[in-house]
Image (cartoon, rainbow, N blue to C red):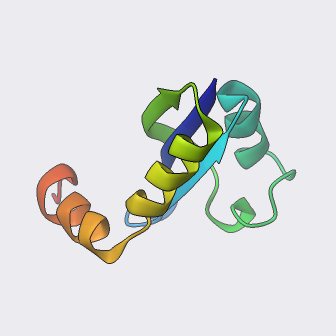
Amino acid sequence: MFYVYIIKSFKKQDEFYTWSSENLKQRLEEHNTWKSTHTNKYKPWKLVFYSAFESKKIALDFEKYLKSASWIAFRNKRLICKV
């Protein structure tokens, strides 16, 4: 299985990170330790969304969509609770 996921920073509430992995549990652990240089700055992280795919190509295509401006605008307007 291939997973596409979105994590959200506890430290900076408007900071999200989208990526894909074959091992979601291990990858989330890496984000919350010093093993991921791109996400160290805003750890700890919590998983807010994931989707599983049998095909790596479909997973990567979906990851690309989740990083698009149209998806980010939708996410920020409809999915993020602003308190």
Q: Between residues 11 and 80, which one lies in front from this camera angle? A: 80
* Image: 58 above or below 76: above
Does residue 19 appear in this view?
yes
Task: Give the farthest residue toward the right.
Answer: 35
The reply, left or right, for residue 75 in relation to residue 6 is: left
Q: Quadrant of the C terminus?
A: bottom left
Provide residue 62's location: percent of width, then percent of height.
45, 50
Provide residue 15's location: percent of width, then percent of height.
46, 65
* Image: 62 above or below 52: below
Residue 39 picture quarter: bottom right
- Residue at position x 28%, y 64% from top? 71
The reply, left or right, for residue 69 in relation to residue 59 is: left
Residue 3 picture quarter: top right
Q: Quadrant of the N terminus?
A: top right
Q: Between residues 46 and 2, which one lies in front from this camera angle? A: 2
Does residue 8 appear in this view?
no
Q: Between residues 34 and 79, which one lies in front from this camera angle? A: 79
The reply, left or right, for residue 52 in relation to residue 41 is: left
- Residue at position x 80%, y 56% from top? 36
The number of numbered discs placed on residues in the rendered structure image is 0
The reply, left or right, for residue 45 in relation to residue 8 is: right
